[in-house]
Amino acid sequence: VKHFNVTCDECYTYPLRGIRWKCLHCDSYNLCTVCYMADEHNVSHIFSRILSEDSKGEEMPARFDVKLTGYAFAFGIQENAEVSLRKNNRKRGVVQTIRDDKINVQWSANHEQSQHNILELQCESTVARQFYPDHLPILGKDTLGYLDVDFSENKIKQKIQVNIRYRIEKEQKRSYKPVLYLIFANNQDTDHKKDRCSLIDEVFEYSSR
């Protein structure tokens, strides 16, 4: 999705692509998704999430209240990630920029740069990037199961059906009961995948006896 006549006021990308995040506190201030998720601009300001040029927008909660919104981490082929070619995994480099679905990579051996699509690359060492999952639309729900795809080669647009299974979590009510967490011995590293924190519900049953 392109938002014509709209520029990201942080990274100055024009036209703004994907979801448009419009600040409701400031006059004519917009962010792209990358800048919004990176906590650019005032995190206490309320933004409207605009999916397309004819969308009315949906108001989002402020980002500063992490307990309310919550954030997660994305891993994969992003800027500054180390990648290799799938056809030649000995050739390794670092992702410089990602624009228009083209990934610009600078190769370590000769310092040359070249563009690739994501299927040609394999992630070797990734960089974590935070995002707010509750602020993103659920694909298939907001689009009624269909997406408009622009096939630029044939200059035609077609609707493709999107079937995505996702878990609908029950509404969690605030509880003032004491909660016990057991934190198992974590290695001294920054790998988020190895961090585990388990809630033991049986403690409540035991304590009530």
Image (cartoon, rainbow, N blue to C red):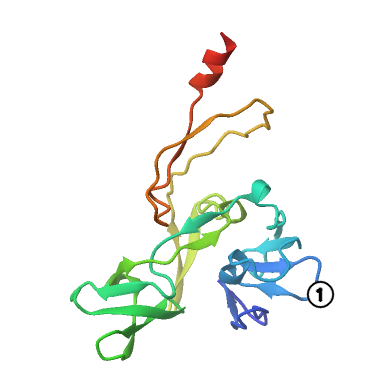
Q: In percent of the image, x 49 and y 57: which residue is there? A: 73
Visible residue check, residue 153 = no
Q: Position of residue 158 (x, y in %)?
A: 45, 66
**Image position of 126 (left or right of 21):** left
Image quadrant holding the N terminus, namely bottom right
Q: Count of labels shown?
A: 1
Q: Position of residue 79 (x, y in %)?
A: 44, 75
Quadrant of residue 13 in the image? bottom right
Quadrant of residue 75 in the image? bottom left
Check the image and name the residue furthest to the top. Answer: 209
Amino acid type assigned to the residue bearing label 1 in the image: Asp
Image quadrant holding the C terminus, namely top right
Q: Position of residue 113 (x, y in %)?
A: 34, 89
Q: Nearer the viewer, residue 92 or 135?
A: 92
Q: In percent of the image, x 38 and y 78: which residue is there? A: 95
Quadrant of residue 81 in the image? bottom left
Vertical position of residue 33 compared to residue 11: above or below? above
Secondary structure of the residue carrying tag 1 is: loop
Disc 1 crowd, CA 10 A, few/some/many (<14, 14-19, 20+): few
Q: Nearer the viewer, residue 48 or 53?
A: 48
Q: Position of residue 23 (x, y in %)?
A: 74, 68
Visible residue check, residue 174 = yes
Vertical position of residue 31 compared to residue 197: above or below? below
Q: In percent of the image, x 29 and y 84: which residue is there? A: 108
**Image position of 14 (left or right of 194):** right
| Residue that numbered label 1 is attached to | 27
